[in-house]
């Protein structure tokens, strides 16, 4: 998972960041983007880091704490469903990623991004399946996923009818069934649920 980090380190880049998102596909909740600049010295590499989708929730939680403690710098940004409906999910994701780059406490020399191309004053490299190929992106993917899952657990307390803690807002058959039964709640994405329920409901 260090092919890209090694390549750019050898080219003279010192602060190499990874960016990824969680929550592009769900029917409810925000998309969450995270950036991480990780130390790449061998003695500071965190064992077990992988694409967040390949890890159990418990393993992600453990790694989240290790990444936040070890990172040179990191930042997490959420873009809510209102913005997603207004500018579409791809643009909302790009906005979240740009905000990560602009708000992290240390500006990186280069940013590796999972698949998305963004225009930025900092050099950015989109990598297809980057969360499986880059340690830095994988760290960011874990930050984004855990942060978003925690958010959805909080939303579950606020809107218990929808069982958000269980499906995290994704379009499971149970979630769609509840959506049709109760109508939408304030965190549902109108542009995503229009096939299931009238979006003029409150």
Image: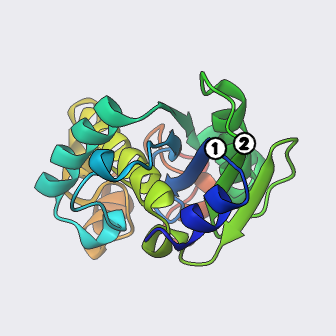
- At mark 1, the secondary structure is loop
How crowded is the residue under tag 1: few (<14 C-alpha within 10 Å), some, or many (20+)? some
**Quadrant in the picture for residue 180:** bottom left
Q: Residue furthest top?
A: 105
Quarter of the image containing the N terminus? bottom left
* Looking at the image, residue 146 lies above or below residue 131: above
Apparent side of residue 187 relative to residue 105 in the rendered image (left or right): left
Q: Quadrant of residue 68?
A: top left
Foreground residue, 5 or 180? Answer: 5
Q: Position of residue 85 (x, y in %)?
A: 69, 49
Which SS class for mark 2? Answer: loop
Q: Residue 63 versus residue 33: which sits nearer the camera?
A: 63
Which residue is nearer to you in this view: 72 or 173?
A: 72
Q: Is residue 194 visible?
A: no
Q: Residues within 10 Å of mark 2 (few under 14, many from 20)?
A: some
Q: Residue at x 23, y 45 (%)?
A: 161
Q: Which residue is mark 1?
A: 14
Apparent side of residue 58 relative to residue 14 in the rendered image (left or right): left
Above or below, comparing residue 7 to residue 190 in the picture: below
Please report contact status of discs 1 and 2: CB closer than 8 Å, yes or no. yes
* 88 relative to 17, above or below: below
Residue 61 in the image, given as x and y percentages of width and height = 19, 46
Q: Which residue is found at the position 50% from the left and 45% from the top?
A: 32
Front residue of 95/84: it is 95
**Which numbered tag is attached to residue 192?**
none
Q: Residue at left 50%, top 63%?
A: 197
Q: Which mark is residue 109?
A: 2
Work out whether mark 1 precedes mark 2 in sequence or the reverse, and give the earlier one.
1
Identify the colour scheme used. Answer: rainbow
Q: Position of residue 22 (x, y in %)?
A: 46, 55
Q: Is residue 8 left or right of residue 3?
A: right
């Amino acid at each position: 998972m260090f092919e890209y980090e090694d390549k750019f380190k050898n080219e003279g880049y010192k602060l190499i960041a990874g960016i990824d998102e969680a929550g592009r596909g769900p029917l409810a909740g925000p998309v969450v983007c995270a950036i991480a600049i990780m130390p790449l010295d061998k003695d500071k590499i965190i064992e077990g880091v992988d694409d967040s989708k390949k890890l159990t929730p418990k393993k992600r939680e453990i790694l989240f704490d290790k990444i936040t403690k070890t990172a040179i710098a990191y930042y997490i940004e959420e873009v809510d469903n209102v913005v997603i409906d207004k500018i579409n999910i791809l643009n909302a994701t790009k906005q979240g990623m740009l905000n990560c780059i602009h708000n992290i406490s240390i500006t990186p020399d280069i940013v590796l991004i999972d698949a998305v191309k963004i225009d930025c004053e900092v050099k950015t490299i989109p990598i297809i399946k980057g969360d499986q190929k880059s340690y830095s992106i994988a760290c960011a993917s874990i930050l984004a996923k855990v942060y978003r899952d925690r958010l959805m657990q909080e939303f579950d307390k606020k809107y218990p009818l929808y069982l958000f803690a269980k499906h995290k807002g994704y379009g499971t058959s149970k979630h769609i069934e509840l959506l049709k039964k109760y109508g939408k709640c304030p965190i549902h994405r109108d542009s995503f649920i229009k096939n299931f329920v009238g979006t003029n409901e409150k």
